Image (tube, rainbow, N blue to C red):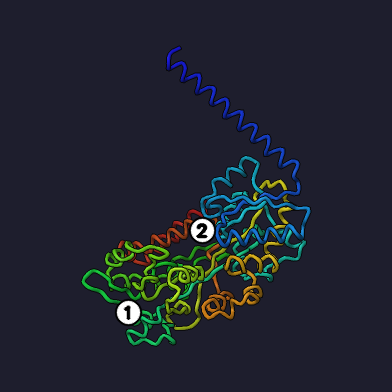
Amino acid sequence: MSNSIFHKLMFSFCLVLVMVLAACSSDDEASESASGENTVEFWHSMTDTAGDAVEQVIEEFEKEYPDIDIKATYVANQGEGQNEKLLTAIAGGNPPDVAYFDRFEVATWAAEGSLESLTDLAEEAGISKDDYYDFAWDELIYEGDLYGIPTTTDSRLLFYNRDHFEEVGLDPENPPTTIDELEEAAEKLTIKDGNRFERIGFIPWFAQGSFYSWGWSFGGDFYDPETGEVTADDPKNVEALEWITEFGKKYGVEDIAGFTDSQGSGAMDPFVSGQISMKIDGNFGVASLEKFAPDLNYGVTPIPTPTGDNFKTWSGGWSVVIPKGANNQDGAWEFLKFFGSEEGQKIFSEGSRDFSVIDSVNESLGYTDDPIFSEFINILPESNSRPVMTAGSLYWNALADAVESSTRENGTPKENLEEVTQRVTEALEE
């Protein structure tokens, strides 16, 4: 027998073997699904403290619902914009019963018919928007229907190095509240030698300084849910981008890029190393500071606005959803209700240190008494969520492109934001 014929026979044998094993595996899964009707398959991407916290939620749930078994499976990147495995499972008619899911993506998946509506179930159970922060609930509504139960949230503020403030004669007890004060502080804090920053006071677009943060802080808006109008080129948004562009010109966009390109996260975060004095970041950044710079003397304060009042922020977060075609929807709904209840939220938030979507839970866990966390909690009732639309990811990326183009003088801020409005509007009309 020639080598060529032998290899072809071996390839055919292996192919048949893989098909047989796949069929057996499928049969096993189908059997398990059919026999375990009180088993709830739960896919999530949580690790470390969040992974431990969700295990505590599951343990307590199973105590209270002994007839329901939660089979939790870690799936990398689940719900983080890389949901190919979940999408394949839904298309194949064998999805998990519950998935941990980024709220930002719920509208897109609901529009594609990939999630089960929870509207009737929530109404029967007496669960409503009144139970949660408004923005957290609103992110889960698509065309009037509910598609998830919120579980976590966050917010964004200005972090500032108190020692740096004292060093240059700024009062750390009175951090900047207006855009003018922010500019003055940034100038005093910056140390530049030629094109190289030894220390930079502030970079508007660094860390969590996304354009959503600045547009809302300048009084702008991005979407009218009543009319479906995209408003990226809102005059206040244009004003915000003009300020960002001028800031970039003042310090040199290429010089800033040279600085940020040499930085990183964790221990490499320039706020940790003292190379940047102020930054916009979320409450999730606190854990990193506690780990890598436990002695750093810093404070947090609302993101400055042109007028020094009417402070804004925006929040993201997670939810639990029932994928379309889930086998055990009754059991899944019981788990969703528990996870989103005050009891479930307290267990999870206490373990993970993520903020709850229920104000009373955050208060009961002492977050409102913590000098740092309380600032993030206090602003949550006034927080915004990113527009709930099927082109949410496109909108996010288009705004980032507008900032990049404007700061590099490729088009004016007004022109670039008008282009964003047009691109997103066209995408919504497709």
How many other residues sit within 10 Å of disc 1, few (<14), some (14-19) or many (≥20)?
many
Q: Position of residue 246 (x, y in %)?
A: 32, 72
- Which is more toward the observer, 52 or 361? 52
Front: mark 2 or 1: 1
Along the horizontal axis of the image, is 195 left or right of 94? left
The amino acid type found where label 2 is placed reads: Gly
The amino acid type found where label 1 is placed reads: Leu
- Which is more toward the observer, 215 or 44? 44
* Residue matched to label 1: 189
Q: Position of residue 230 (x, y in %)?
A: 50, 63
- Which is more toward the observer, 301 or 105? 301
Labels 2 & 1 near each other (Cβ < 8 A): no
* Residue matched to label 2: 392
- Residue at image location 44% in from the left, 67% down from the top: 208
- Is residue 177 at all visible to an observer of this figure? yes
Q: Does 50 sit above or below residue 382?
A: above
Comes first in the chain, label 2 or label 1: 1
Q: Position of residue 257 (x, y in %)?
A: 31, 64
How many other residues sit within 10 Å of disc 2, few (<14), some (14-19) or many (≥20)?
some
Along the horizontal axis of the image, is 217 left or right of 69? left
- Which is more toward the observer, 231 or 391? 391
Q: Quadrant of residue 305?
A: bottom left
Alpha carbons under labels 2 and 1: distance apart? 36 Å
Describe the element under mark 1 as helix, strand or loop. helix
